């Protein structure tokens, strides 16, 4: 028998996710993941039987609950639902979806409005670090309309500035996991950095796109962390 579970479909940054109160989902990870796969419509390249948008950016989930540490207002667990596989991952954080956690927490009574801007301290369970989202609440409620624009999203909306506290090395243990701020991999200079999420910076002039797959293979084996390819 089908059972209704409350959720909110909300955009955060350049992504979109289902936001849940963690207490509304099964406490067993296996059972929880089955629910989330069904909600998104995975595994299916089109996600036709769910609300996922057939792309990793639109197949995401945020689980929110009261904070389990004294220096935060809420806990936030990010989950990536794989589009074409029966797989749900908590291996990394998502700053895009983080932008929606503050408004959701206020709308659902977990945080009280505190003037024209309400600071929401968010404990990011994926990395164990804390971020502070500054949510516009000038009229005693969350303001969604505004003039802020970002690449990849049409139109404009209210800006939600976020302060990231002590996130250096949150996934790999060090800001520079290779103990160097510049590494040379297959003859190309790169910077491997973990400042909230593992990533690499590579000069586009030094790294033709034809070599990107080989570079990704080398980066995956360079430090034990899962790196993203970020030409820059």
Image (cartoon, rainbow, N blue to C red):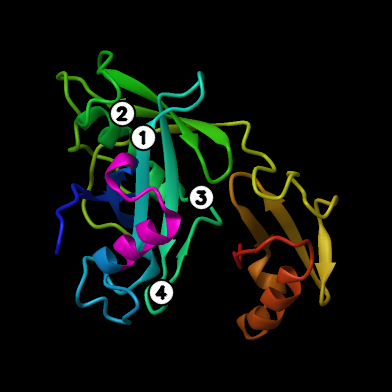
- Residue that label 1 marks: 65
Q: Determine the secondary structure under disc 2.
A: strand
| Residue displayed at 70% across by 82% down | 214
- Say if the magenta span includes residue 154: no
**Mark 3 and mark 1 in contact (Cβ < 8 Å)?**
no
- Residue that label 3 marks: 93
Per the model, the C-alpha gap separating discs 4 and 3 is 20 Å
User: Which numbered disc, 4 or 2, marks the residue closer to the eye?
Assistant: 4
Q: Main secondary structure of the magenta part?
A: helix
Q: Is residue 194 above or below residue 146?
A: below
Q: Earlier in the sequence, mark 1 or mark 2?
A: 1
Q: Earlier in the sequence, mark 1 or mark 4?
A: 1
Residue 203 appears in the rendering: yes
Q: Position of residue 40 (x, y in %)?
A: 28, 66
User: In the picture, residue 75 is in which quadrant?
Assistant: top left
- Residue that label 4 marks: 86
Q: Earlier in the sequence, mark 4 or mark 3?
A: 4
| Foreground of the two, 221 or 115 | 221
Q: Earlier in the sequence, mark 3 or mark 2?
A: 3
Crowd around label 3: few <14 · some 14–19 · many ≥20 (10 Å): many
Q: In which quadrant is the C terminus drawn?
A: bottom right
| Residue displayed at 77% across by 48% down | 176
Residue furthest out toward the front: 1
Q: Is residue 82 above or below residue 19?
A: below
Left or right: residue 3 versus residue 175 is left
- Residue that label 2 marks: 135
Q: Earlier in the sequence, mark 4 or mark 2?
A: 4
């Amino acid at each position: 028998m089908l059972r209704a579970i409350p959720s909110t479909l909300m955009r955060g940054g350049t992504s979109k996710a289902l936001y849940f109160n963690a207490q509304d989902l099964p406490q067993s990870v296996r059972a929880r993941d089955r629910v989330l796969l069904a909600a998104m419509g995975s595994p299916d390249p089109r996600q036709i039987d769910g609300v996922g948008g057939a792309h990793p950016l639109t197949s995401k989930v945020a689980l929110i609950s009261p904070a389990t540490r004294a220096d935060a207002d809420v806990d936030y667990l990010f989950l990536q639902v794989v589009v074409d596989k029966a797989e749900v991952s908590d291996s990394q954080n998502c700053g895009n979806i983080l932008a929606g956690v503050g408004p959701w927490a206020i709308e659902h009574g977990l945080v009280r409005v505190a003037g024209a801007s309400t600071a929401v301290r968010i404990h990011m369970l994926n990395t164990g670090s804390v971020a502070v989202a500054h949510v516009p609440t000038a009229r005693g409620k969350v303001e969604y309309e505004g003039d802020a624009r970002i690449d990849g999203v049409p139109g404009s909306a209210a800006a939600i500035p976020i302060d990231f506290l002590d996130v250096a090395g949150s996934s790999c243990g060090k800001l520079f996991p290779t103990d160097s701020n510049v590494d040379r991999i297959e003859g190309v200079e790169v910077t491997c950095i973990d400042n909230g999420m593992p990533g690499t910076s590579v000069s586009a002039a030094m790294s033709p796109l034809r070599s990107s797959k080989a570079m990704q293979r080398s980066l995956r084996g360079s430090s034990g962390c899962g790196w993203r390819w970020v030409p820059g």
